[in-house]
Amino acid sequence: MGSFTRLTGIALLALLARPVVAQELAEEQVNLVSSRLAESARRSWEIGTRAQAILEHNATRYSVFANNDLPPPSNIPGDQQGPLEPLWNIARGVLSGGAGGSTAQPLVSDSAVSDPASIGVAVLLANYTNLDKKDDQYEHAARNQYDYLMSNAVPKNGEGAISHKTEQIQLWSDAVYMVPPFLAYYGVITNDRTPLDQAYEQIKQYRAQLYDSNAGAWKHIVGGNSGTDDSFWATGNAWAAAGMLRVYATIDKSKFSGKMKSQKKDLKNWVQEIHKGVYERYFDGENLLRNHLNDPNTFYDAASSALLASTVYRASTVMGQHKYVPYAERTRLTLFTPNTGPWTNTNWTRFGDYQYFTTDGWLRPVVDPMNTGNQGQNSPEAQAFVVLLHSAWRDWRWAGEKGKNAAGRTAASYSTVLASAFSIAVGSLLL
């Protein structure tokens, strides 16, 4: 026993003597997470979120966060053809469902107004690149989705905010990720500023109804006669921040950027206020967010924690906001580090010993997407959030790791996780 303890102590000392490096997932692990996402995404918003994960992680040249102007190349570079294929399969599935006709309608059938629009960027890119020489069909599908959102068939409140539901006027924080990014990208592809203005206005109206300045966070659902939710749902705040970032990046990379400075300024401030409110009020030593931010009786949710952390890295690279990078690093290190500590993973294709992943790559614990008050099991959107977090962190690192010094102080506090182990190691060597 004493010999084993000494060997353990020596190993720990060697581990702690190594230079501090970033703990990250291997690409094979991210691909495993993506495989679980691909096999499970069936609902409209899950498919749309998967499409965005494909763009941000694989087909990076065609992401709104790429370092190039919008729209992207209509002639697809050779190195992007393979990575785009999963996105094209999503677009093809939309056409096979009958979305390319001449009637204003959502891209896919759904009980929610907002969610089908989340697939819209995939369809717009299929149109723009003339996928399968069917650009007219993809153009019709995208235009039908846009016309549907603007039509009288979709309920809107007195200020013009598009309802998330068809049967009543109701605003959900989720919708900020589904509709405005599509509207903004529609404007870029059609060379029309109006949809970009509409994207901004939708966010403005949603924020006016959902943001609670006293709480520093967004409510989940307001309006309507039933199904309201005044809670400060963590995933809803992450959806809102992520949607606003996509709209900001779309405007910023477009030819209309110079004439929309005030809109961009607002979007930056609105993302920052979510980060400030959530991280300064509701983030604790667990480094994860409660499912309902201000309710200590709700579980720690890895899914919302991952998505919100991804928005911090994106805010750093596209908005120049670095203050909350340390918080994102705390979440990323917590989720992506094996139980045995940094540098101890020996199988970079699986999750052999991770607290927040099953061995086959499912993130846990996660909220049930169909009942946001409960903890769920396998969540497709949570899988997408992992990919978005890894991709955003990777791009932040490539961009120079702004905010790294502040993050270093957080990393130092993270290293205290190993402090007791260090003490044990020293003690065992003295036995």
Image (cartoon, grey):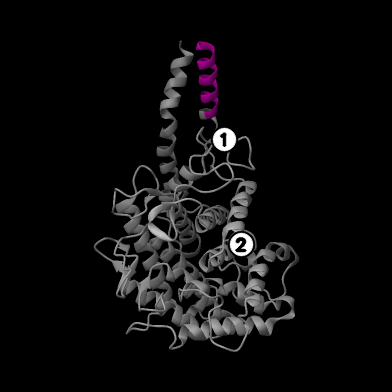
Q: Are marks 2 and 1 in contact (CB under 8 Å)?
A: no
Name the side, left or right, on which 60 lies relative to 276. right
Q: Is residue 274 above or below residue 262?
A: above
Q: Which residue is mark 1?
A: 343
Any magenta on residue 272? no
Amino acid type of the residue tagged 2 in the rendering: Ile
Amino acid type of the residue tagged 1 in the rendering: Trp
Q: Position of residue 226 (x, y in %)?
A: 31, 71
**Secondary structure at numbered mark 1:** loop
Of residues 6 and 221, the one drawn nearer to the viewer in this rendering: 221
Q: Position of residue 104 (x, y in %)?
A: 54, 86
Q: How many marks?
A: 2
Q: Is residue 156 above or below residue 15?
A: below
Please say whether residue 60 is visible from this viewpoint. Answer: yes
Please say whether residue 262 is visible from this viewpoint. Answer: no
Q: Position of residue 311 (x, y in %)?
A: 46, 59
Q: Which residue is mark 2?
A: 54
Task: Name the quadrant containing residue 238.
Answer: bottom left
Foreground tag (2 vs 1)? 2
Of residues 47 and 42, the one drawn nearer to the viewer in this rendering: 42
Predominant SS of the magenta segment = helix
Residue drawn at x 43%, y 45% as measured from the top left: 330
Q: CA distance from mark 2 to mark 1?
A: 27 Å
Instruction: Give the crowd class for mark 2: few <14, some 14-19, many >=20 residues within 10 Å.
Output: many
Span highlighted in magenta in the image: 1-15
Any magenta on residue 12? yes
